[in-house]
């Protein structure tokens, strides 16, 4: 994150639109980590994410004069980056989806197989991280994009709808399904205690809990859900595992760092663009 002394986005935008190259360079530097991380999550390939970051940030430089702030700069960048990623998906739709952990620290298979290679806690954490990456990678792109934007990048549902060109209702419908799918993949590794449910007695508590997180249920329905969780260890454990899954999504985004070669590549491309006569 940038300090207050670096200037707010709208201050830098105003200066960049007036031709201040330093302000433009600072805007690009400020947002490159966000764009690169988002590209990794969507494209699932470091080289594609590198290309996407460069293309998106150059689009910012080229379009800075026309950007008038109808949406936030971050939201606009997500939309541009997603557009580039969709094009890459279409070109490489028959290629296998990489499942390399995206925090830059891949765990060798023999380390995962041999508990002596890592401390128990670290080994368990790495297994969960890998399972999370694989679960997100395994989602259909339409669901993956919603989950990444909402639960990894932290956009609001209306902002996700703006990026994807969907209604808020459609975003939330995809979001709930994506959350439950990822949670199901992680549940065996989260070790949340629970007890078998009595057949036919439990509501669809996971979807209800996900809707609760999006303020989609009434206070009365919320109160009934809380009463049920208080007396049903299985459902409480399931909701706790969903809560842990979403917390892991947010933790993972903080760990992704922009490689030095990507920073150099973006800076060189921007300098070349700025040096080109209009």
Image (tube, grey):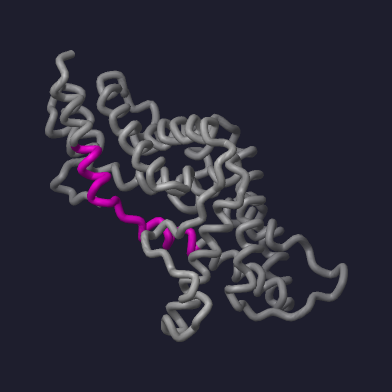
Q: Is residue 38 magenta?
A: no
Q: Residue furthest right?
A: 200
Q: Nearer the viewer, residue 53 or 61?
A: 53
Magenta extent:
247-267
Q: Nearer the viewer, residue 196 or 276?
A: 276
Q: Is residue 258 magenta?
A: yes
Residue placed at 41% from the left, 43% from the top? 39
Residue placed at 53% from the left, 77% from the top? 113
Please provide percent x and percent y for residue 246: 53, 61
Question: Based on the displayed image, in which of its 4 quarters is residue 135 positioned?
Answer: bottom right
Looking at the image, residue 166 sits to the left or right of residue 208; the answer is left
Please provide percent x and percent y for residue 21: 13, 29
Residue placed at 42% from the left, 84% from the top? 119
Please provide percent x and percent y for residue 104: 36, 59
Looking at the image, residue 22 sits to the left or right of residue 143; the answer is left
Question: Based on the displayed image, in which of its 4 quarters is residue 30 positioned?
Answer: top left
Residue placed at 43% from the left, 60% from the top? 252
């Amino acid at each position: 994150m940038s300090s207050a002394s670096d200037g707010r986005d709208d201050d830098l935008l105003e200066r960049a639109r007036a031709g201040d190259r330093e302000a433009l360079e600072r805007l690009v530097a400020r947002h490159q980590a966000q764009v690169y991380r988002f590209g990794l999550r969507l494209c699932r390939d470091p080289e594609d994410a590198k290309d996407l970051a460069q293309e998106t940030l150059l689009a910012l430089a080229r379009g800075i004069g026309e950007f008038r702030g109808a949406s936030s700069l971050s939201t606009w960048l997500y939309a541009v980056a997603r557009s580039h990623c969709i094009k890459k998906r279409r070109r490489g739709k028959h290629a296998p989806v990489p499942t390399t952990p995206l925090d830059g620290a891949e765990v060798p298979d023999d380390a995962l197989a041999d508990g002596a290679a890592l401390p128990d806690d670290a080994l368990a954490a790495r297994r969960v991280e890998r399972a999370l990456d694989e679960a997100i990678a395994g989602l259909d792109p339409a669901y993956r994009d919603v989950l990444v934007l909402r639960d990894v990048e932290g956009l609001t549902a209306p902002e996700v709808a703006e990026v994807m060109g969907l209604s808020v209702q459609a975003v939330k419908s995809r979001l709930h399904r994506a959350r439950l799918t990822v949670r199901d993949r992680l549940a065996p590794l989260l070790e949340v205690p629970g007890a078998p449910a009595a057949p036919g007695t439990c509501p669809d508590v996971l979807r209800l809990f996900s809707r609760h997180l999006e303020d989609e249920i009434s206070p009365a329905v919320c109160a009934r859900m809380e009463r049920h969780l208080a007396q049903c260890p299985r459902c409480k454990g399931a909701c706790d595992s969903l809560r842990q899954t979403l917390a892991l999504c947010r933790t993972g985004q903080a760990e992704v760092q922009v490689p030095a070669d990507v920073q150099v590549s973006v800076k060189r491309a921007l300098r070349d663009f700025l040096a080109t006569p209009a």
